[in-house]
């Protein structure tokens, strides 16, 4: 192969190494170092470019937005360990189970609630497969429909915020948007925030939930034998008290986290910290034994702090605060102690029963994987661009027939196919920085593009035979469920996802209207 095609060979070798089972981080860094050396020997790579690596890595590790990732992961894992899914499924089943397809609709609604409160896709699929799937099969649900509804609902955590994928996608898309503006000669640039991406994903995510529910209700109406109503003595009647106890905690947490971001009250990192604190307190309330009043005291202090903040200026370091403001600051200090006591007690309770150790361990593993991927992808992108790969990608997309639309459809198809073999983190960090700047230079809206990519990745997560969610479900499904049942059941939901993608393609306002209303773009 000619030396000028080193960038193409580099990408092929990287994909091949991942397919052979080598760890992605080591594959990225190893391939980058190997081809940097080859490029230097063949005179195709300037070694001075590697001097920028330390600055780029430092920028990744000190990026305030990315701090939200471990906080959201901690929140999700803590809520997953607190058995919130079990209680939600039980109460939703009691509410809808006596209707045709009611249990499948309950699974879709619980999947949406868990997506908006935890965002952990694998854990959601496995949890619902262990709890809801046996009940659905035992009550006569067609195995394919039961498997498809559980698998599809479990992946809603990728598109409904707060989602780790959306945080990563927002950061990558923001960088690509800045590159595109610099390439146009603009130095007074517009920025892209996580809040805008969250707002852009809200309407398509809710549309997707609605489409799932309409499909399930329609199937149950015309083919009642595949999704029968539960036998009356199989499921207790729903009671208002238990239903509210199951729904209130995740709904309050969703409003606190997403409401503060979309309302402009807090940054994503600050909102993620609120979510992590709220998850600790909710978990402590659900753990067996122990006292409840310290948690309620901490919650009351948080509410009082919010009310006080809305009435009094609590900023420190001002030259001459009024007497009322001094009093407010003193009260806020006492309320802070109450919050700290509640959170500290919640952490102690979680540690005593062994939950905190598992949560911290899982959070560290996931966060370390994501940040190591960022560092490996930074080196890979640096070498790939040094070999001229970015110019080749740009030339390829510009040469495609159909102009802007043809390039967009090609990129979506490429990402969809790569989703079979690569995780969303790998695609977001490796592939999107290469193609997004070119598409944005063509005039494509960055929020619209980000939401299309997010739904596309979720769809590839579901598509047989390689969708990651299918493997999660296969590992947790009861013995009577065959792989063919999972594949047959998920195909209609893949079609529904493609309909949503088509709707967002044809109606960009589905992704851009809410960000424009909330953030003015």
Image: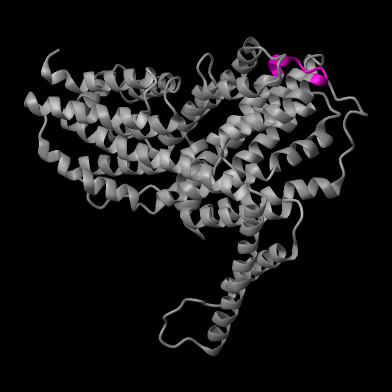
> Which residue is outermost to the right?
233
- Who's the residue at 79% across and 28% down the image? 102
- Who's the residue at 67% across and 64% down the image? 299
Q: Nearer the viewer, residue 506 or 462?
A: 462
Q: Is residue 262 magenta?
A: no
At which x and y percent is residue 7?
A: 20, 23
- Who's the residue at 86% across and 40% down the image? 238
Q: Is 443 placed left or right of 488 in the picture?
A: left
Q: Is 442 placed left or right of 149 in the picture?
A: left
Q: Quadrant of residue 274?
A: bottom right
Q: Is 44 placed left or right of 35 in the picture?
A: left
Q: Is 443 placed left or right of 515 in the picture?
A: left
At which x and y percent is residue 85?
A: 70, 39
At which x and y percent is residue 252?
A: 67, 53
Q: Is residue 211 visible?
A: yes
- Who's the residue at 63% across and 71% down the image? 338
Q: Nearer the viewer, residue 506 or 35?
A: 35
Q: How is the image coloured?
A: one colour
Q: Is residue 198 above or below residue 43?
A: below
Q: Which residues are magenta?
A: 138-145
Q: Is residue 195 visible?
A: no
Count how many numbered circles sit on residues in the image: 0
Q: Quadrant of residue 228?
A: top right
At which x and y percent is residue 373?
A: 36, 36
Location of the N terminus (image quadrant): top left
């Amino acid at each position: 192969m000619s030396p000028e095609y080193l960038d193409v060979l580099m990408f092929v070798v990287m994909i091949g190494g991942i397919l052979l089972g080598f760890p992605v981080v080591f594959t990225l860094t190893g391939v980058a170092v190997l081809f940097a050396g080859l490029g230097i020997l063949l005179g195709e790579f300037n070694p001075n470019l590697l001097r920028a690596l330390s600055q780029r890595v430092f920028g990744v590790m000190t990026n305030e937005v990315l701090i939200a990732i471990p906080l959201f992961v901690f929140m999700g894992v803590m809520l997953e360990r607190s058995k919130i899914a079990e209680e939600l499924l039980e109460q939703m089943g009691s509410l809808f189970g006596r209707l045709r397809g009611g249990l499948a609709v309950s699974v879709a609604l619980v999947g949406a609630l868990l997506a908006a409160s935890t965002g952990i896709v694998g854990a959601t699929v496995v949890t619902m497969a262990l709890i809801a799937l046996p009940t659905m099969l035992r009550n006569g649900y067609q195995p394919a429909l039961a498997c498809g509804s559980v698998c599809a609902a479990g992946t809603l955590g990728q598109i409904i915020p707060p989602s780790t994928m959306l945080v990563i996608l927002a950061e990558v898309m923001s960088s690509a948007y800045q590159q595109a503006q610099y390439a146009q000669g603009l130095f007074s640039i517009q920025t892209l925030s996580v809040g805008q991406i969250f707002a852009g994903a809200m309407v398509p995510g809710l549309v997707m939930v609605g489409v799932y529910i309409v499909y399930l209700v329609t199937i149950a109406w015309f083919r009642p034998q595949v999704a029968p109503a539960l036998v009356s003595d199989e499921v207790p009647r729903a009671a208002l008290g238990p239903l509210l106890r199951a729904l209130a905690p995740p709904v309050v947490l969703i409003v606190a986290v997403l409401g503060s971001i979309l309302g402009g009250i807090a940054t994503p990192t600050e909102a993620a910290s609120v979510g992590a604190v709220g998850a600790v307190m909710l978990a402590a309330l659900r753990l067996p034994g122990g006292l409840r009043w310290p948690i309620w005291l901490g919650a009351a202090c948080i509410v009082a702090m919010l009310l006080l903040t809305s009435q009094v200026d609590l900023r420190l370091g001002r030259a001459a605060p009024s007497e009322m403001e001094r009093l407010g600051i003193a009260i806020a200090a006492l309320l802070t102690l109450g919050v700290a006591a509640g959170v500290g007690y919640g952490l102690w309770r979680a540690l005593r029963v062994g939950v905190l150790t598992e949560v911290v361990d899982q959070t560290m593993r996931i966060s370390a994987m994501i940040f190591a991927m960022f560092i490996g992808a930074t080196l890979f992108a640096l070498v790939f661009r040094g070999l001229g790969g970015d110019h080749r990608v740009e030339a390829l997309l510009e040469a495609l027939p159909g102009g802007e639309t043809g390039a967009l459809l090609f990129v979506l198809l490429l990402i969809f196919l790569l989703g079979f073999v690569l995780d969303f983190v790998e695609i977001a960090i490796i592939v999107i920085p290469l193609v997004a700047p070119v598409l944005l230079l063509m005039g494509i809206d960055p929020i619209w593009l980000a939401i299309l990519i997010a739904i596309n990745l979720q769809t590839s997560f579901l598509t047989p035979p390689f969708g990651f969610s299918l493997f999660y479900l296969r590992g947790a499904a009861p013995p009577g469920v065959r792989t063919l049942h999972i594949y047959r059941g998920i195909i209609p939901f893949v079609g529904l996802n493609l309909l949503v993608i088509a709707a967002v393609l044809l109606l960009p306002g589905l992704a851009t209207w809410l960000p424009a209303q909330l953030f003015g773009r």
